[in-house]
Amino acid sequence: MIPLVAGAGCIVPAILGTRVLGTMREWIIASTLIVLTMCSARTAVILGAVSLMAGWRAAVAIYAVTAGLGLATGIGLHRFLPGRCTGLVMEMCPFR
């Protein structure tokens, strides 16, 4: 979930954040969903260009289609890729 949230800001560091995942199955699912995430650059283009040229309804439709595609892709990859989800345990440094 953390790389997906990071993907809303920029996709490149989010993809780099997937290196800590335990299995290749988790890496494939996370990487695919991160690529489908609307990052800040895509958001600016959609809100700026698409809203200006085609209207706000077209921009909202693009967001809806992208969200639906991401949801369908996530469910499909979860069902069709063999394996199980593993827990992720990371050592955190003390925040003082």
Image (cartoon, rainbow, N blue to C red):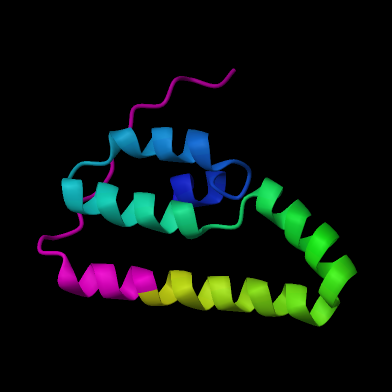
- Residue plotted at (50% across, 36% down): 12
Q: Is residue 12 above or below residue 8?
A: above
Q: Quadrant of residue 67?
A: bottom right
In x, y percent, where is residue 51? 84, 69
> Image quarter for residue 66?
bottom right
Q: Residue at x 55, y 44 (%)?
A: 6
Picture residue at 37% right of the left edge, 55% below the top? 32
What secondary structure prevails in the magenta region?
A: loop
Tell me the magenta residue range: 73-96
- Image spot of residue 4 (x, y percent): 48, 51
* Residue 77 is a magenta residue: yes
Give the left or right position of residue 43, taking residue 74 as reference: right
- Which residue occupies the foreground of this view, 32 or 26? 32
- 88 falls in the magenta region: yes
Vertical side of 91 occupied by 28: above or below: below
- The single residue placed furthest to the front in the displayed view is 53
* Extreme residue in the left direction: 82
Identify which residue, 68 or 45, lies in the foreground: 45
Task: Where is residue 24? Give x, y as percent.
Answer: 18, 46
**Does residue 11 appear to the left or right of 83 in the view shown?**
right
What is the tally of numbered marks visible in this picture? Answer: 0
Q: Is residue 6 left or right of residue 92?
A: right
Instruction: Please name whichever residue, 52 or 77, is drawn nearer the observer in this view of the structure.
Output: 52
Res 70 → quadrant: bottom left
Residue drawn 20% across the image and 74% down it:
79
Figure quadrant of the C terminus: top right
